[in-house]
Image (cartoon, rainbow, N blue to C red):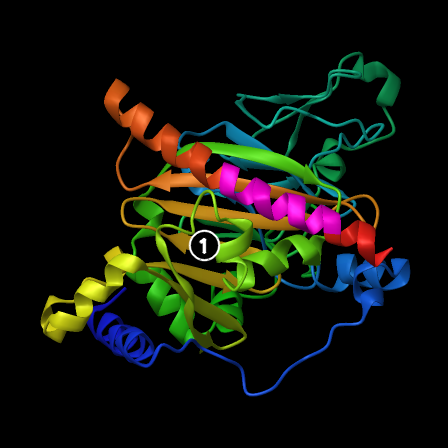
């Protein structure tokens, strides 16, 4: 975060501390129970939100070398994200063009060729069909027409974004893509959010660890818990509550997205300091909430990435969590330190999972 932005946020936090207040919206909003139960609405969300908007499908730091890949499930679309020999990241539909078998069910890996486990058709890292065993049985097809399906993909801020609804050529290079994806993504995020994300240098961060957790609740119930800290004193009374000010947050709108600052008790140091001495990033956890399902949380010495996606039914979802560090984690001491942070955040998140699952039961 740039200095001017820190000063503006610092002033807002100090005003809250002095007044004993918190950020509130200008009006109350009621959510109907059906928003979390209705199957027709849920199906519309899966298409409109997760195909017609850019969605983060991978972490660039998980793909440092050509051939490194990770897998991810968009609603009804399994994808494989891979760094090609040309250094580009591509989002490929994770399905062999012969019989549709998954090319890989592993969460991550490395491959010089992607080989289908069913009949061993193989594909290059750019998605082009490389070889067909016993090709004499397939004389009526042209290899150029059987490259893997490619989703429009752009790598920004250390994240790999796919935009399924945009048109893309069937060829692996996506040469017929008729829009500037980078410009489209910047327009979607907005200048304010782009500037703040850029200021952290996230493209230089390193992947430490990730986990995927199934949740027996509608995806919005799980993601809702990341959009407020009113619950922090109560749900997180054994984890976060002793570190954080009670229900003290500040929101700033960034286009269609938000920045939420959850304030630590240490922020009271700012009350007796000159503004030039404020260290806002030490005294607050900043969550950048990116529509529709991404939260990037900036902590003092690491970044936490949250993604929540719909599951196979309206009352199911999947929480993806990753921890990134500014430097590679080397040595036993550093490994223990960041592992403790990782486990702590996941443990805190599991308290949110329990709440969301309980709410889902009562809504039914």
The residue that appears at 64% across and 63% down in the rendered structure is 53
Q: Is residue 326 magenta?
A: no
Residue 68 image position (x, y, % from top left): 49, 28
Left or right: 231, with 300 as reference point: right
Q: Is residue 206 above or below residue 226?
A: above
Assess disc 1: are there few (<14), some (14-19) or many (≥20) residues with their C-alpha within 10 Å of its C-alpha.
some
Quadrant of the rendered structure where residue 336 is? top left
Q: Main secondary structure of the magenta part?
A: helix
**Secondary structure of residue under mark 1:** strand
Left or right: 223, with 64 as reference point: right
Residue 212 image position (x, y, % from top left): 60, 35
The residue that appears at 64% across and 82% down in the rendered structure is 28
Residue 139 image position (x, y, % from top left): 85, 23
The N terminus, quarter of image: bottom left
Q: Which residue is mark 1?
A: 296
Of residues 187 and 278, which is closer to you in this image?
A: 278
Residue 351 image position (x, y, % from top left): 58, 44
The residue that appears at 66% across and 49% down in the rendered structure is 355
Q: Is residue 356 magenta?
A: yes
Of residues 277 and 207, which is closer to you in this image?
A: 277
Q: Is residue 81 visible?
A: yes
The C terminus, quarter of image: bottom right
Give the extent of the magenta segment.
Answer: 347-358
Q: Is residue 119 above or below residue 194?
A: above
Left or right: 173, with 199 as reference point: right
Left or right: 27, with 274 as reference point: right
């Amino acid at each position: 975060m740039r200095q001017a932005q820190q000063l503006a946020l610092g002033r807002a936090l100090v005003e809250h501390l002095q007044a004993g207040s918190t950020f509130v919206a200008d009006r109350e909003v009621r959510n109907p129970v059906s928003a979390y139960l209705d199957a027709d609405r849920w199906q519309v969300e899966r298409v409109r939100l997760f195909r017609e908007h850019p969605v983060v499908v991978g972490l660039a730091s998980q793909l440092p070398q050509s051939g490194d890949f990770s897998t991810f499930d968009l609603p009804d679309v399994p994808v494989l994200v891979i760094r090609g020999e040309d250094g580009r990241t591509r989002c490929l539909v994770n399905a062999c063009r012969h019989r549709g078998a998954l090319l890989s069910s592993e969460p991550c890996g490395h491959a010089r060729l992607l080989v289908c486990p069913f009949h061993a058709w193989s594909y290059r890292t750019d998605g082009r069909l490389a070889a067909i065993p016993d090709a004499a049985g397939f004389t009526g097809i042209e290899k150029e027409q059987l490259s893997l399906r490619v989703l429009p993909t752009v790598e920004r801020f250390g994240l790999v974004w796919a935009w399924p609804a945009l048109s893309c050529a069937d060829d692996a290079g996506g040469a017929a893509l008729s829009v500037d994806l980078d410009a489209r993504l910047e327009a979607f995020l907005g200048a304010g959010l782009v500037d703040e994300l850029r200021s952290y240098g996230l493209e230089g961060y390193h992947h430490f660890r990730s986990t995927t957790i199934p949740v027996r609740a509608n995806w919005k119930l799980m993601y809702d818990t990341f959009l407020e800290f009113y619950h922090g004193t109560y749900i997180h009374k054994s984890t976060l509550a002793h570190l954080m000010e009670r229900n003290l947050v500040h929101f700033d709108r960034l286009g269609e997205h938000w920045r939420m600052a959850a304030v630590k008790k240490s922020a009271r140091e700012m009350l007796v300091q000159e503004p030039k001495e404020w260290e806002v990033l030490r005294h607050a956890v900043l969550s950048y909430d990116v529509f529709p399902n991404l939260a990037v949380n900036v902590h003092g010495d690491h970044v936490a990435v949250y993604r929540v996606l719909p599951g196979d039914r309206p009352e199911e979802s999947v929480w993806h969590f990753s921890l990134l560090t500014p430097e590679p984690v080397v040595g036993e001491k550093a490994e223990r330190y960041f592992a403790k942070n990782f486990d702590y955040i996941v443990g805190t998140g599991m308290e949110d999972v329990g709440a969301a699952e309980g709410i889902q039961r009562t809504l039914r």
